[in-house]
Every structure is written in structure tokens, then in C-alpha cells.
């Protein structure tokens, strides 16, 4: 007599393949049927959800301010014509990227290498925000470098467009060259966070593995030996332009290293170990911006002992020759090159700092976020205030005289900041982008 039991004998989840969870259903006759469940949705603490308005200031000669083709500079923040539901803003070298609550991406600025990911053949169209339409899924995070942009989808896929460069010029986004439209970066696991340096892209997988691609000359990829750093050496461009895994030595007593967070500067990368909270770094160290006192570049991950006094680092951001970091208590630290006041330690303090050094004037401000540009630094407080310091030549700071260098953090001013609170700030080559919300 036939059994009344279901023809499905057992159902058990198996490995995650790509970005969909695969269920293997085994029937009585031994046949295995693979069924794809609903797409997974990735999450990381760096994903932003609070929506606001976009303001820009600084120099905008190629449209990076998004205020129209006739606006070439702003001494104080100006409001960009965008929906009031932007949740993340990123300033590239000469372009700007904005992400909305619905997962749509808007770009404006220089499009010479395809960094906007959209058509700008109509004269002046690059100077006003417009949507990147060739993205198939909802986007939850964006990043930008000098000439490239990347986007992370809600199910962990990474798309990128634009171009990477090195000291000799263009190297392409892929071996085929610059990409004018978004292309998928093929990775072995779903990604939960992306960050960009000037010309490199870093991706954190849901399994704690880090992937990097782009320029490797200063060691910023963390997986390319110095002998292959210039355009991949005898291995060729594909070696550096195809995403590769950053390997780290096993930690005694902790086993395989798993990373929980990543950050990037112009030519550096930082990462946090999940098990211990320790900070690792690699890349350019010519002004101690890695927090190591020998001024030697690092081409593989190295534990940064100078960060060991805290296990609760929230954000580490790098400019060209300096680094700004914030810990869980809201204290801001800087290190690296001191010229133009980018460390924020006062006009009488002209020495480079080899270790994270407390910015005393921000103590007690309760800072929640920091940002760094080439020679400028920013901090956002829990009250929504923005403090800026560093080189004033490009009018990026929005405080003091229009081109005055600021050696200590000074609160940003402007009519568009009245009765508004800052949510985040991002610094590009010569411009600054601010996300604010109305206090009312």
C-alpha cells in the first residue's frame, strides 16, 4: 500500500550561492531539486536611513555643486534641487553622488571618464542632478573616488562605472577601459559595505572577507606585492582590476580573521577585525597617515598598534596625507601631515602626528561622524553642527574668511544651515556636500 507520507522526504538549507539562498529538496527517488528562495537583503551599520536635503559649497567649475551650469563657486552652502528624501551623499574628486530613500542614485559633476553613469550629451546637463537609470535593483549604499562611482544593491551586488587612474594616467575600470554605464563587479559572496579611495574600491563580504580592485601603486589594495603594484607588473592589468581577496594572517587564539568594517582614504584602506575590534591598515604612509612611525608604505594588512587604545572605532576617514577618526564616545582624533591645519590641533602645532591625536577643541561636542578631503577635515556633532578645518583655498570649509586656512575646528555657517541639523558631510577634491534635515 502506498505511503501517505509526502513525496518530499527532507528539506534542509544548503550553502548560500551568490546572493540567493538555495534550498535543496530531496525526493524519495533521490532526485535533488534546487529551489531559489526570496533574495536576501544585506545590512551593515554603515547603511543610512535618515532622509534630508542636500547642500553644497566650494568650487564647482565642472558642475560638481549641482547648482546649475552658471554657478562656479559657493562660499556658503547652497541648496541642490533634489527630492527631500536623500539618505546618503558622497563627494568624488570632481563629481557628487546622492542616494534616495527609494534606492535611486543621482549624480552631477565631471563626466569625462563616465563617473556620472548617465548621458550628459546635452550641454550643461552634467551641472544639475539626474538619475542613473541603468541600475536594476534598489541601492542601499554608494561610494565615489576621483573618477569612479560604485553602488551596492539591497541583495549584496556591486555595480560600478567610471575609471581608475594611476601616476601614469588612465588604467580603466576593467581591462576593456573606462565604463560609461554601470557594470556588475562579480564577487564570490554578497557584499554588505563598499568604500572608495581616490582610485580603488573596497568591498566587505557578508562572510567578513574583503575584496579590492583598482590602483595598487601605494599598496592600497592590500593584496598586491610591490613588484606588481605598477599596473599589475608582468601579471597585467587584469590582476588589479579584477576583484581579489585581501588575505590576513591568522590571529593566535582567534583563528581565521573575519572583518566587520572597512574605510578608505585617498591612498589607504583601514579594516576592523570582528573578533577583537583591532584595526588593520595598508597603503600610503609617507606622512604617518596609517599611524605607523616609519613612513613606509604597507602592501599587506598590518595591525595598527597606535589604534589599540580603543576597540570602539566608529569611522576612520583618510585625506591625501592625513587621517581623521572618531570613537564610540564621540571623540575625534587626527594624524599625519599637519600643513594648512588639516589636523585641527592649533596654529602652533605644525608637527606631523604618528599616532591618533585627540582634537581637544571638539572634546565634549559629542561628535557622531567625521569626513576628510585632500587637505580638509570635518566633524558632525550630535546636535547637528558641522565643524570644519584645514585648507581654505577652495572655499570648502564654509567658515571664517572665504580662503582662510583654519587650524582649529570652526563651526560652518550659512543661511541654508539655519534651523537645520546636519546628518552627514562628505569632502571632494574642491567641494563639500552636506546632508541636513529641517529642525521643525
Image (cartoon, rainbow, N blue to C red):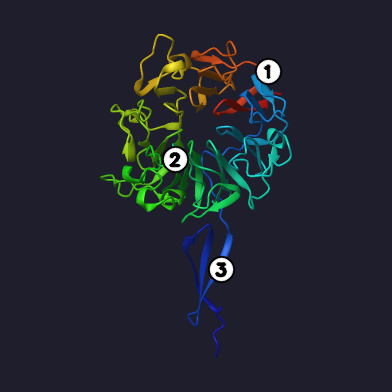
Q: Secondary structure at mark 3?
A: strand
Question: Horizontally, is 105 left or right of 256 in the view?
Answer: right
Residue closest to the far front? 168
Mark 2 vs mark 3, foreground winner is 2
Work out whether residue 47 or residue 317 is closer to the camera in this orientation and state it: 317
The tag on residue 35 is 3
Work out whether residue 95 or residue 28 is closer to the camera in this orientation and state it: 95
Residue closest to the far bottom? 1
Quadrant location of the N terminus? bottom right
Counting from the top left corner in percent of width and height, residue 367 is at: 51, 23
Counting from the top left corner in percent of width and height, residue 261 is at: 44, 40
Q: How far is mark 3 from mark 1, CA to CA? A: 54 Å
Counting from the top left corner in percent of width and height, residue 315 is at: 46, 32
Q: Can residue 155 be seen by looking at this rendering?
A: no
- Residue under label 1, please give it: 418
Q: Secondary structure at mark 1?
A: loop
Which residue is pictured at 55% across the width and 17% down the height?
A: 393
Marked residue nearer the N-terminal end (2 or 3)? 3
Question: Horizontally, is 262 left or right of 133 in the view?
Answer: left
Q: Secondary structure at mark 2?
A: strand
Which residue is pictured at 67% across the width and 24% down the height?
A: 72
Counting from the top left corner in percent of width and height, residue 192 is at: 51, 46
How packed mark 1 is, by other alpha carbons closer than 10 Å (few <14, some 14-19, many 20 or more), is few
Marked residue nearer the N-terminal end (1 or 2)? 2
- Residue under label 2, please give it: 261
Residue closest to the far top? 348
How packed mark 3 is, by other alpha carbons closer than 10 Å (few <14, some 14-19, many 20 or more), is few
Amino acid at each position: 500500500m502506498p505511503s501517505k507520507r509526502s513525496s518530499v522526504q527532507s528539506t534542509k538549507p544548503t550553502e548560500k550561492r551568490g546572493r540567493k539562498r538555495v534550498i535543496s529538496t530531496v525526493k524519495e527517488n533521490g532526485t535533488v531539486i534546487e529551489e531559489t528562495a526570496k533574495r536576501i537583503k544585506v545590512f551593515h551599520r554603515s547603511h543610512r536611513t535618515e532622509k534630508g536635503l542636500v547642500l553644497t559649497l566650494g568650487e564647482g567649475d565642472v558642475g560638481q555643486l549641482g547648482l546649475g551650469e552658471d554657478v562656479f563657486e559657493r562660499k556658503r552652502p547652497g541648496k541642490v534641487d533634489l527630492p527631500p528624501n536623500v539618505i546618503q551623499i558622497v563627494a568624488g574628486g570632481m563629481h557628487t553622488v546622492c542616494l534616495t530613500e527609494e534606492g535611486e542614485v543621482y549624480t552631477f559633476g565631471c563626466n569625462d571618464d563616465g563617473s556620472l553613469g548617465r548621458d550628459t550629451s546635452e550641454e550643461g546637463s552634467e551641472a544639475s542632478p539626474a538619475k542613473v537609470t541603468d541600475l536594476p535593483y534598489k541601492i542601499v549604499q554608494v561610494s565615489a573616488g576621483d573618477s569612479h562611482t560604485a553602488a551596492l544593491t539591497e541583495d549584496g551586488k556591486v555595480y560600478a562605472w567610471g575609471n581608475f587612474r594611476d601616476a601614469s594616467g588612465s588604467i580603466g575600470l576593467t581591462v576593456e577601459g573606462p565604463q560609461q554605464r554601470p557594470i556588475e563587479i562579480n564577487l564570490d559572496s554578497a557584499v554588505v559595505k563598499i568604500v572608495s579611495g581616490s582610485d580603488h574600491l573596497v568591498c566587505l563580504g557578508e562572510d567578513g572577507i574583503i575584496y579590492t580592485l583598482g590602483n595598487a601603486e601605494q599598496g592600497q589594495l592590500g593584496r598586491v606585492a610591490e613588484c606588481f603594484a605598477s599596473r599589475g607588473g608582468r601579471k597585467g592589468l587584469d590582476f588589479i582590476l579584477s576583484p581579489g581577496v585581501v588575505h590576513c594572517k591568522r590571529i593566535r587564539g582567534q583563528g581565521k580573521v573575519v572583518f566587520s568594517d572597512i574605510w578608505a582614504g585617498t591612498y589607504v584602506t583601514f579594516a576592523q577585525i570582528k573578533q577583537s575590534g583591532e584595526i588593520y591598515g595598508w597603503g600610503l604612509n609617507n606622512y604617518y597617515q596609517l599611524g605607523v612611525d616609519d613612513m613606509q608604505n604597507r602592501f599587506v594588512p598590518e595591525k595598527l598598534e597606535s589604534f589599540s587604545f580603543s576597540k570602539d572605532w566608529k569611522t576612520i576617514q583618510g585625506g591625501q596625507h592625513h587621517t581623521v577618526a572618531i570613537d564610540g564616545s564621540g571623540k575625534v582624533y587626527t594624524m599625519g601631515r599637519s600643513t594648512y591645519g588639516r589636523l585641527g590641533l592649533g596654529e602652533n602645532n605644525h608637527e606631523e602626528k604618528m599616532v591618533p591625536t585627540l582634537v581637544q577643541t571638539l572634546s565634549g561636542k559629542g561628535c557622531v561622524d567625521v569626513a576628510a578631503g585632500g587637505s580638509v577635515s570635518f566633524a558632525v556633532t550630535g546636535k547637528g553642527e558641522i565643524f570644519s578645518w584645514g585648507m581654505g583655498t577652495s572655499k570648502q570649509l564654509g567658515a571664517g574668511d572665504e580662503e582662510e586656512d583654519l587650524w582649529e575646528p570652526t563651526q560652518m555657517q550659512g543661511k541654508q544651515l539655519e534651523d537645520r541639523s546636519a546628518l552627514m558631510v562628505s569632502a571632494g577634491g574642491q567641494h563639500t556636500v552636506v546632508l541636513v534635515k529641517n529642525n521643525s
